[in-house]
């Protein structure tokens, strides 16, 4: 038997409120390291360069905020 949580077989599994609270509490107060932040920044920059090169235009361009 495969261990639970390692394989995508538990995708969509419904977790109890208690379990979700424990998962939330375990992650609370943690922030990404400087290295991780740099990696995310570089990835986002590359993604935007690709979108702009492909002719991406914001769906909100030209619309008012009203």
Image (spheres, helix red, strand yellow):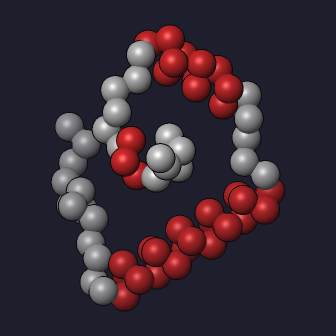
Q: Residue 40 in the image: x percent, y percent?
A: 62, 63
Farthest residue, direction bottom:
53
Could you tell me which residue is drawn at 74 percent across and 35 percent down?
Answer: 30
Residue sitting at the far right: 34
Q: Is residue 59 rendered to the left or right of residue 44? A: left
Q: Position of residue 22 (x, y in %)?
A: 59, 19
Q: Quadrant of the C terminus?
A: top left
Q: Nearer the viewer, residue 4 or 57?
A: 4
Instruction: Using the image as rendered, state which of residue 32 and residue 48 is in the foreground.
Output: 32
- Vertical arrangement, residue 46 with respect to residue 2, above or below: below
Could you tell me residue 48's position as x and y percent? Answer: 45, 74
Seen from the viewer's position, the closer of residues 62 and 36 is 36
Vertical relation: 40 (above or below) 53: above
| Relative height, residue 43 to residue 23 (above, below) | below
Picture quadrant where residue 60 is located: bottom left
Residue sitting at x 63%, y 65% = 41
Task: Tell me if residue 2 comes above or below residue 12 in the rendering.
Answer: below
In this rendering, the count of numbered labels is 0
Q: Quadrant of residue 37?
A: bottom right
Classify residue 56 as left or right of residue 16. Answer: left
Name the foreground residue: 60 vs 27.
Answer: 27
Residue 45: image quadrant is bottom right
Residue at the limit of the structure toward the front, as seen here:
1
Percent position (x, y) of residue 51? 36, 78
Q: Residue at x 53, y 68 (%)?
A: 44
Q: Is residue 7 left or right of residue 54?
A: right
- Taking 54 as reference, is 40 left or right? right
């Amino acid at each position: 038997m495969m261990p639970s949580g390692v394989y995508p077989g538990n995708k969509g599994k419904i977790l109890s409120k208690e379990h979700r609270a424990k998962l939330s509490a375990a992650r609370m107060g943690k922030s990404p390291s400087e290295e991780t932040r740099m990696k995310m920044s570089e990835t986002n920059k590359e993604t935007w360069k690709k979108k702009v090169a492909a002719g991406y235009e914001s769906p909100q361009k030209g619309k008012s905020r009203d």
